[in-house]
Amino acid sequence: MKKAFTLIELLVFMLILGFIIVVAGRVFSDSTGMRVRTQNMTKATEEVNKIAELIKEDMSQMGVKAWGISGSSSTTFDTVANVHILFNNPNPDYSSYKLTRNNPGNFDHLLFRKAYYDDNGVCGAVMEIEWFVKKVNNIDVLIRKCTPLENPKCTGTFDEEQCKEVEVEMATNVQTFVLLPSLPNDDPLAFGGVPATPGTPTFGLLNRGDNITTCTDICETVITPNTNTLSNFVRNASTSEKKKHQVFVAQPGVTGDYTKCEAFEFKKGETYAVTFKTPKIQSVADSMALFQPGVDHMAVGLRDSDNGYAQIGTDFMFYPPQENGANDINQYFEFSVPNDVEKACIAFTFAFYSGTEDIGPHKGSLKIQDFELSHKKDEAYTFADIYDPTADNYDPVYATESDGANKLKNKKNVKAFRLILEVNKRGEVASTRNINQGGYIIPTPNNGVTAKSTPSPIPPP
């Protein structure tokens, strides 16, 4: 005969069953909560990554490049002035952005300009773009706004759908929107664009007078501190002629032939930069307005002084100022060498084919000014810290609109930004701080690098 459960056994069974139900319920609840939090974090992360990519696509095109236009006698290159924030004298700002800190908040306001190019590579418009955070129904919302700026030089086609004067909501529940401008990260190797003592030249040019050219004395004496003027060029009558002009960079005051050029050591895999200006010649008659890219040749590159001054790597082509606006072009080139080079000089090479015997760029002059060679310490960018007052690079207003006397100099030298963007989705915060050592890095190579033009001044934004 089977016995029934006793009351004690029944109570113990119910206690165990209740415990199991409670534990299972807690596990299910935790699992559901974890799934919801994971979903919220995933959504927040996806939104942050998507917005960061959009901002990068916008900002990476900050600034302007030159483009080809048809002239009456040749094809020349032109630039847009109002892509720079304030280009008219006496206090020009040749950067392409304005960054305003919203202290004590975590929301910056960025305004920048870029040129829009059509399918033919001709400027269609200048676009002024803003990214900022504002309250919408008591929620912090990231906004993008685009305003087209008229420019008579932008004669290409422009799709107005690319830039409408409306505020577009890009992200909600934003906790942080901060942009950190990059600090200079170059180690000057020679000359340094600005003379240490006013009135003192920082570099010289030596003519190469061997059989690669029939010209002599194409490098005149220093006319103004830190500037060398080249002239007395000759023209090749046909493509079969190989007349070239070549000058080598030297220390200021050095005389003699090109073998007295300044030799440098370059390491394989490391990055270097050459910077110089090509100012406009004041006299129209002396200018190179008829220079034709693709026909005439102006380049700078390395020559191995231990091996007969043979060419190292590929030379960098550059263009002179034109008579259609540009009056001061900053030339900037980064390079590396395929192998270690113990002694290499820097040479400028010129060959002219366009025009006639009496007309052409060979009849003009060219200025080389503020030459500088730099060794980039590494390919990473460094940024001013605005959060840690104990950090060596702590500077909450570096290269912003509150940067004081150095604002213009700092702004035009900024070549990247670190974006710190944080978005909250139902309590879960996604952040670009988890990307690339604390922020999303956006290179802006065209900011403050390209031509400076001076058409009729327009009011700053």
Image: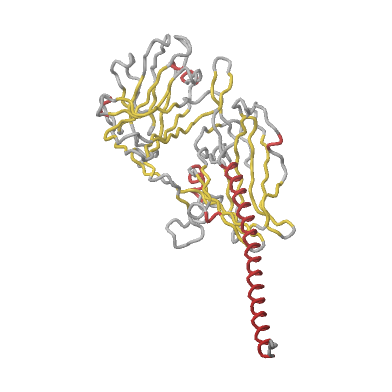
Q: Quadrant of the N terminus?
A: bottom right
Location of residue 435 in the rendering, given as x and y in whole percent from the top left corner: 52, 53
Q: Nearer the viewer, residue 459 or 295?
A: 295
Relative to 248, is 443 above or below? below
Location of residue 316 in the rendering, given as x and y in whole percent from the top left corner: 42, 28
Q: Nearer the viewer, residue 377 or 104?
A: 377
Location of residue 317 in the rendering, given as x and y in whole percent from the top left corner: 44, 26
Residue at x 45%, y 27% (from the top left corner): 318
Q: Quadrant of residue 428?
A: bottom right
Relative to 120, is 116 above or below? below
Residue at x 38%, y 11% (from the top left corner): 241
Q: Quadrant of the C terminus?
A: top right
* Farthest residue, direction front: 1
Relative to 273, is 44 above or below? below
Location of residue 429 in the rendering, given as x and y in whole percent from the top left corner: 60, 60
Residue at x 44%, y 63% (from the top left corner): 390
Q: Nearer the viewer, residue 285 or 104?
A: 104
Residue at x 63%, y 56% (from the top left corner): 44
* Farthest residue, direction bottom: 7
